[in-house]
Image: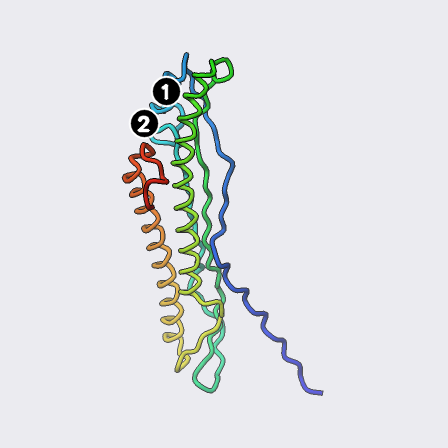
Amino acid sequence: GGQQQQAEEPEPPPPPGANIIRNPDQYYDVSGNNAAEAINNAKANKVNRQCDPGFAGCTVVRMTNKVGSPSTGRATKVKNGYRVTENTFSPRVSAEITVYLPKWTGYESASNSEKAAWDNMMASLKDHEDGHVDIAIQEANRTAQDLAKALPASRTFIVKNGTVNEITAAVTARYSQANKVVADGWSRWYAREKNYDVITDHGKIPRSSVQY
């Protein structure tokens, strides 16, 4: 019988979206003899180093990407040139999201009216931070989709002559394009986050009243 050729295992297609890691909300303690004092202490934020001073809460997003390195495998002669198989192909985008919020240590012993004042502040703060979370998820998914288009699922592509320089240039161009897609995505996300804070005045205007 003839020799059997082992078929190459196809590379799985990139995911349609990013790998989103939504961590549980993290709370830091604030003191206060009443709700107003506790709210002022939370806004001063001298305790939680994750958030900037002057802001009671914040959303921390750690965006990462893995494009891979531009390396090549073998080139095989085919009818219309040379088919090149890449050794490295791993376009992935991840977003790890954590919201930091204040916790009033005197809440349980406070009067109902004081609790209501604190609850109202927290509801507004959580609503604002939810907007930051929405933007992060949207832009991470958009970047992942753009990256999948820049580096198609196939690990192989065709070049005309199959020379080392030609193959290297083709592979490097693909990865340079992918890295630009990621950089553009991060810039777009950062700009949207900043604009969201501007149009909501850092939560003073409900996010339901604005388009972000």
Of the pair 73 and 170, the residue shown nearer to us: 170
Q: Which residue is mark 2?
A: 54
Query: To which quarter of the image does residue 129 belong?
Result: top left
Q: Residue furthest right?
A: 1
Q: Does 60 sit above or below residue 112?
A: below
In the figure, residue 130 lies in which quadrant?
top left
Q: Is residue 194 above or below residue 48?
A: below
**Horizontally, is 180 left or right of 12 in the view?**
left
Label 2, secondary structure: give it: loop
Counting labels gives 2
In percent of the image, x 39 and y 26: which residue is there?
121
Mark 1 touching mark 2, by CB under 8 A? no
The N terminus: image quadrant: bottom right
Around disc 1, counting alpha carbons within 10 Å, would you say few (fewer than 14), some (14 to 19), or many (20 or more)?
Answer: many
Q: Position of residue 114 (x, y in %)?
A: 43, 16
Distance between mark 1 and mark 2 Cα atoms: 9 Å
Sequence-wise first label, 1 or 2: 1
The residue beneath circle 1 is: 41
Residue type pointed to by label 2: Gly
**Residue ID at (41%, 50%):** 138
Give residue 4's position: percent from left, percent from top. 66, 81
In this orientation, which residue lies closer to the viewer: 45 or 134? 134
Q: Residue 85 bears which disc, if any?
A: none
- Residue at 43 percent of width and 30 percent of height: 123
Measuring from the top left, give residue 41's x and y in whole percent: 37, 20
Q: Position of residue 50 (x, y in %)?
A: 40, 32
Amino acid type of the residue tagged 1 in the rendering = Asn
Residue closest to the eye, 37 or 62: 37
Mark 2 Cα-neighbour bin, 10 Å: few <14, some 14–19, many ≥20? few
Residue nearest the viewer, comparing 162 with 23:
23
Instruction: Give SS at disc 1.
Output: helix
